[in-house]
Image (cartoon, rainbow, N blue to C red):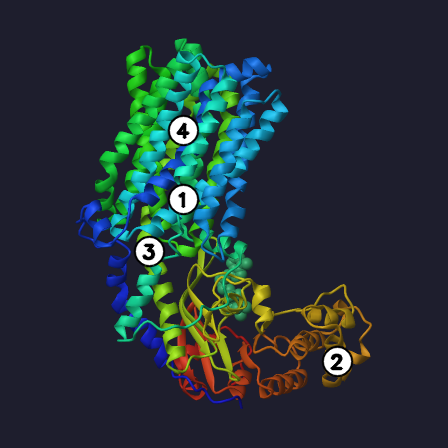
Amino acid sequence: MSHPRVSDDADLTEVERTSAALREKARATLGVTGDGKTESFRALVRKHGLSYYPVVALGLLFVTGAFQSYAFTVLTPEISRTLGISIGAVVGARALFQLAIAVAPLPIARLSQSRARRALLCILTGIAWSAITLTTGFVTSLVTLIFILCLDGLATGSVHALHAPIIVDSYPPPARVRALTAYTAIGTFGQALAPLLVGILASVAGLSWRGVFLALGITSLLLTLCAIRLRDPGYGKWDTEQLRARVRQEHGEAADALSAEDVALGFWEICRRVLLIPTTRRVYAGFAVYGVLTVPLGTFTSVFLEQRWNLGPGQRGLFFSMFFGIGVIALLVYGSRGERQFRASPVRVLRAAGFLLAGTVVFAALGGLMPAFVPMLLSFGIAGGCLGLLQPMLGISMLSIIPAHMRPHAQALAGIFIAVGGAVGAVLLTGVQDQFGVGGTMVAIAVPGVIGAFIIASAGRFIENDLDRMIDEVVEDEEIRRIKHSGGHLPMLSCRGVDFSYGQLQVLFDVNFTIDDGEMVALLGVNGAGKSTLLKVISGIGLPTAGSVRYRGQEITYLDAERRMRLGITQIPGGRAVFGPMTVVENLRSYGYTMERGSVERGIETCFEAFPRLYERRNSVASTLSGGEQQMLGLSKALMLRPRLLLIDELSLGLAPVIVGQLLDMVRRINADGTAVVLVEQSVNIALNLVDHAYFMEKGEMRFDGRADDLLARDDLLRAVFLHGAGAAK
Ligand SMILES: Nc1ncnc2c1ncn2[C@@H]1O[C@H](COP(=O)(O)OP(=O)(O)OP(=O)(O)O)[C@@H](O)[C@H]1O
């Protein structure tokens, strides 16, 4: 028999109780109070001894980032004439620029992953893009233009990855929407100022486009220097860390000095985890449409203004100033209203964002169709107002549901979606321009825009759930630390509230499962109940859509399968768990690829001692082995790796009783040597003979969790197994 179960899950029940008790307080800590009341921004800044500097400094960096881009937008016709390249080529070069912007945030997020040095990265990239803007004045061909634009795009990456997360970490949740809108307002003001400045430099000061870039480069450098005192506030100071403190308060404990866990997710694991959040996915779809709008549309609008309305660079500069200027006004007016909306419910913010996106495209299309100048200006003005509000609204919705240290990654991914939208938009709109002229491009933008608006508004359905999920994750994490610290018992592995879906098909529902060190448990249920899926969630082959997996007290829910294997979790999948075309020895060697050479050979010896039949067939190709021999080979993986936790899926299926007996003896031995075993079995008889503790699943839910003897008394559950004719002999 396996080791007796030490844990009665009381500690984990305590975690769930605390999570439930803290949820409302936690939501308030994250700024969602449900009442929509707000204190003034100034009062909040004073109360918490904060300053306006982060908003202003980052806003200035945002402004300088805009210079190069908008000088380009306004001067597109002149640049294309001087360099002798078509408008299509310029739009293509801009698409590459967007691609560079898209790629850049990823390494920037990576650089700030383990250490909070976001401010430093922002300043350095600010200096870099100032130098690049300056150099743009010396471009002589399409190739150098593309090169410069790509460099600029790479430097601009920090805006996407780091600015909003720094703002969010610099101010407490009740002030965040306003801090973010104020930052966006300063940046948008820069977007309004940049074209105006370009217009003035080009027409009033009479500079060529090259001169304009030189002047902007110097201005950009001076503004960047104003941000030099920016410091990183640290990750999650106002939210996730506050939530942790609340957990400790709940238990009347002082802040403890536990060290951080070392199962930190890697870069791609974080990206994958962010992409699993339903709200985030929809918001990203919205960002893609935002990219279609902002990237190529700016360039086409400039050409549209020249061709349709004969506007020179100065007048075009004025036009864009108006466009973004209205965005600034909208942001200033919206700031506190947005804060109230968010506090009442973030669903409202997302719905409003959907409307605004629809408004932007519809009014931009109308602007393209207007026969008279003033109505055209008015339409674009309204579009500018809507567009200005979009980014902070999408930004705050997304960042509020993502743990602090993952926010740069989330922003970086948003940048990619904007860029992909931009690139697709450039291709589509160039096609439309060829067919229907530049006015047609303005109208064409309405279609994807309205679709994007619906997608964003639909994210509202998920955001409340996703917010609670983040809260639960942090609270649970802190609870576990506390239990560990106070010497409470934690099971070796625990799955709490696990949901899992294959695409749209949900197959696990709120599943709880635990196993102790050295224990052997059975996981039973009819075909299709979700047993194999639960094993996949534990071993990391599948990632849950909700819930957590903890192993030796550490959260591993989103850790790669390979990393889990190195931590001691090994799965022997159901059916033929071998590499068919390889020989027995080659299969054994492949299991040991994480081990040292000497131990691999020793491990192979052990397997041959345990299964002499395998030794006889050592040079045979695995696909020619019998079912029982293949299972012996599969089980040898555990003998080689000596895992802490072994997950075995249907060892006995279709095998003769004598073979099953041999295999099970081996499982017993492995377990007796200290490996905990989860045995998924169709045969109730076999399973219950081996274990003290059993689980029973039905239709994706855990229907029984208790002593194996007690399960035998549950006819209601076991009858299902017998009716399915699953081979139970009891
Ligand atoms: N790759 C997949 N894609 C889509 N659906 C899947 C996939 N794998 C399993 N499913 C579905 O998920 C549900 C649970 O399957 P799972 O294999 O986890 O059940 P099980 O309890 O292990 O059953 P069995 O004992 O037959 O292996 C089933 O309805 C199955 O059809």
Q: Residues within 10 Å of mark 4 (few under 14, many from 20)?
A: few
Closer to viewer: mark 2 or mark 4: 2
At label 1, which amino acid type do we have? His
Query: On the image, which quarter does residue 513 sit in?
Result: bottom left
Q: Which mark is residue 447?
A: 4
Give left or right: position of 8 versus 730.
left
Q: Specify which label sits upstream in the sequence, 2 or 4.
A: 4
Q: Which residue is mark 2?
A: 602
Disc 2 versus disc 4: distance between alpha carbons?
65 Å
Q: What kind of element bears circle 1?
A: helix
Disc 4 + disc 1, Cβ < 8 Å? no
Is there a contact, CB below 8 Å, between mark 1 and mark 2? Answer: no
Q: Amino acid at mark 4?
A: Val
Q: Amino acid at mark 2?
A: Arg
The residue indicated by pointer 3 is 467
- Label 3 – label 1 distance at C-alpha: 22 Å
First in sequence: mark 3 or mark 1?
1
